Amino acid sequence: MKNVKLFILIIALIPLLSSCWSTQYISLQNKYNQEWKGSSKKEIILEFGIPDRILDLDDDESVLVYENNVNQTNVNGEIGRRDFEAESITKTERQQYKEFYLDNNKICYSVRTNEVQEIRQSEPVRTAILVGSIATGVTLITILNILSRKQ
């Protein structure tokens, strides 16, 4: 009977091992604005280093521009197979930037960026399957306990 319970528990927990994750991307622009509005040019340079470019605007205002290239590789195919062959490999390069807008007193009043933060989240459907599987396993074990007491 213990082997049957263990088997049922393992079967119920399989979705836990195969749960799927999705990735969500969130813009960092609001975060940078909250953190850097009101900061001096010196504070920004101390944190990020010498800017790649400095743009002069009207009325003695300026923009500190930081740029870098980001390479990303996406592989599509069935990774679980032994004879894995990628159906397609996509390599992309994109430029990320941060722009700190400074007023005539060299104080930051706005930040623009296209940087994003990746957040991995489980898919709700997989989570529901996982919870349902665990509940089923617990229910089956409880029923087996009741049946074994009657014998």
Image: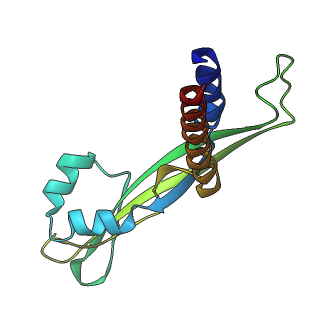
The color scheme shown is rainbow
Query: Looking at the image, how many numbered discs can be counted on the residues?
Result: 0
Residue shown at the point (63%, 46%) measured from the top left: 93
**Residue 93 located left or right of residue 100:** right
Above-or-below relation of 12 to 121: above
Q: Which quarter of the figure has residue 57?
A: bottom left
Q: Which quarter of the figure has residue 87?
A: top right
Q: Nearer the viewer, residue 28 or 23?
A: 23
Above-or-below relation of 70 to 141: below
Q: Nearer the viewer, residue 23 or 151?
A: 151
Residue shown at the point (17%, 47%) measured from the top left: 46
Above-or-below relation of 68 to 85: below
Residue shown at the point (20%, 77%) measured from the top left: 103
Q: Which quarter of the figure has residue 124?
A: bottom right
Q: Nearer the viewer, residue 116 or 141?
A: 141
Q: Nearer the viewer, residue 51 or 112?
A: 112
| Residue 4 locus on image (x, y percent) | 65, 21
Residue shown at the point (38%, 51%) measured from the top left: 52
- Location of the N terminus (image quadrant): top right
| Residue 122 locus on image (x, y percent) | 55, 49
- Location of the C terminus (image quadrant): top right
Name, please, the residue furthest toward the front: 151
Name, please, the residue furthest toward the bottom: 59
| Residue 56 locus on image (x, y percent) | 32, 71
